[in-house]
Amino acid sequence: MSGYRGYFMSGEHIQAVQNFECADDAEVILKAGTLLNSKPQHPAIEIWEGKRLVAHLTQTPLANTDTLHEGNVHVLRSKFE
């Protein structure tokens, strides 16, 4: 299990923080996406494992990006993979 931290974002500003204990990146992305779906007041969440950005998930579609679609959450693939 790895420790991840999710930062609920509004633009460049952190609105809230959520810690996750997950087996891998896929599990934390799924959990964070589910949580983001339940919190419409937060437009996005960034998931970090230490200094590594795992993913940036948003509530709304992003045009011209490499995304995975999970419900109404869109995962912008990390450039640090």
Image (cartoon, helix red, strand yellow):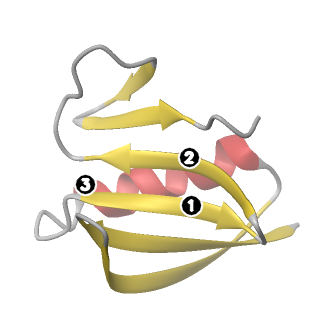
Helix, strand or loop status at disc 1 = strand
Q: Amino acid at mark 2?
A: Ala
Residue 51 drawn at (x, y percent)? 76, 67
Above or below, comparing residue 30 to residue 36 in the picture: above
In which image quadrant can residue 35 be found?
bottom left
In which image quadrant can residue 76 be found?
top left
* Residue holding disc 1: 47
Residue at 83% across, 56% down:
23
Q: Quadrant of the N terminus?
A: bottom right
Helix, strand or loop status at disc 3 = helix
Helix, strand or loop status at disc 2 = strand
Q: Earlier in the sequence, mark 2 or mark 1?
A: 1
Q: Are marks 3 and 1 in contact (CB under 8 Å)?
A: no
How many C-alpha atoms fall within 10 Å of the one at disc 1: few (<14), some, or many (≥20)? many
Residue 56 drawn at (x, y percent)? 46, 48
Q: Are marks 2 and 1 in contact (CB under 8 Å)?
A: yes
Q: Earlier in the sequence, mark 2 or mark 3?
A: 3
Residue 15 drawn at (x, y percent)? 28, 83
Q: Amino acid at mark 1?
A: Ile
73 relative position to 5: left or right: left
Label 3 or label 1, whichever lies nearer to me, is: 1
Q: Are marks 2 and 3 in contact (CB under 8 Å)?
A: no
Residue found at the very far bottom of the displayed protein: 16
* Residue holding disc 2: 55
Residue found at the very far right of the displayed protein: 1
Residue at 52% across, 56% down:
31
Q: Amino acid at mark 3?
A: Asn
Residue at 49% across, 81% down:
18
Residue 37, label in figure: 3
Distance from Cα at disc 2 to Cα at disc 1? 5 Å
